[in-house]
Amino acid sequence: MSDTPEISALRREYVAAGLSRAELAADPLEQFGHWMQQALEAYPDDATSMTLATAGADGWPAARIVLLKRFDADGFCWFTDFRSEKGEQLQQNPKAELLFYWRGLERQVRIRGRVEQLDHAMGETYFHERPRGSQLSAAASHQSFPIDHRITLEQRVAELDQTFEGAVIPCPLTWGGYRLIPELYEFWQGRENRLHDRFRYQYNDTGWQIERLQP
């Protein structure tokens, strides 16, 4: 352990410009769109990466990185195997939170809400937009379940590739999309001396309410 860096001593100063209440859009989706566009321009490869946090009936939280594939007034969408750990947890407890972290811009966005499954047609459309190799992998894998060896999985992919050679690979009924319908957003902008700017949008009967949070 003597060679391990003392992580408690590590520091980082945030130097980005601040975020004021006057700069915020009244609609959090519009505000998110502004920040997403800036993130796409600065870091196009990683801008849509987001942490998806879920919890099942046992209450244990689970988090993983997934990719945002669509966002609009209806919600925020991603795609996966419904039989995966996150799929099982969302079936038991259809609530989740998304976290976007854009390090170079010193920004975070949290989005919390209820989750619903997209209809199969939407999942099927996106499935066939993916590269063939990704389609084969999704169809061959029972996501999150144990397997004896990587070779077994590779063999399944090869067999599917041969079965559907020259043909359309059918989208499995066990694979598709989810949509999170936001009830709360938080926009975080890093600032010097840890005096970060944080604004929370929360929805109630009168619409979106905005309040500044202490850092």
Image (cartoon, rainbow, N blue to C red):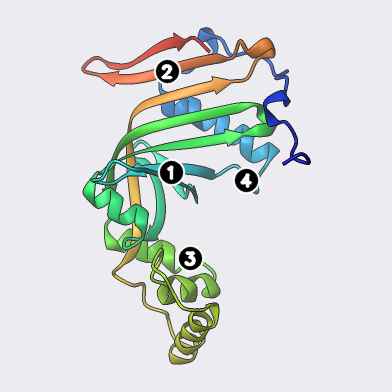
Q: Earlier in the sequence, mark 2 or mark 3?
A: 3
Looking at marks 3 and 1 on the same chain, the residue that comes earlier in the sequence is marked by 1
The dot on residue 52 is 1
- Cβ–Cβ below 8 Å for labels 1 and 2? no
Which is more toward the observer, 171 or 150? 150
Residue picked out by circle 4: 46
Q: Alpha-carbon neighbours of circle 2 within 10 Å: few (<14), some, or many (≥20)? A: many
| Camera-nearest label, 1 or 2 | 1
Q: Nearer the viewer, residue 177 or 56?
A: 56
Q: Please say whether residue 10 is visible from this viewpoint.
A: yes
Mark identifier at residue 129 = 3
Comparing labels 3 and 1, the label whose residue is closer to the camera: 1
Q: Which residue is mark 2?
A: 200
Measured Cα–Cα span from mark 3 to mark 1: 23 Å
| Left or right of 24 on screen, residue 80 | left
Picture layout, residue 176 above or below residue 95? below
Distance in Å between CA atoms under marks 2 and 3: 35 Å
Report, in whole angstroms, how far the alpha carbon at label 1 lies from the one at label 4: 15 Å
Left or right of 198 in this view: 178: left
| Relative side of 73 to 195, left or right | left
* Chain-order first, disc 3 or disc 4: 4
Could you tell me the amino acid type at mark 1?
Leu
Q: Who comes first in sequence, dot 2 or dot 4?
A: 4
Compared to residue 93, the image places residue 210 above or below, namely: above
For image coordinates 54% across by 21% down, the residue present is 188
* Amino acid of disc 4: Asp
Q: CA distance from mark 3 to mark 4?
A: 20 Å
Q: Residue at x 62, y 46 (%)?
A: 46
- Neighbourhood count class around disc 1 (C-alpha, 10 Å): few under 14, some 14–19, many 20 upward: many
Q: Amino acid at mark 3?
A: Glu
Under mark 2, the amino acid is Arg
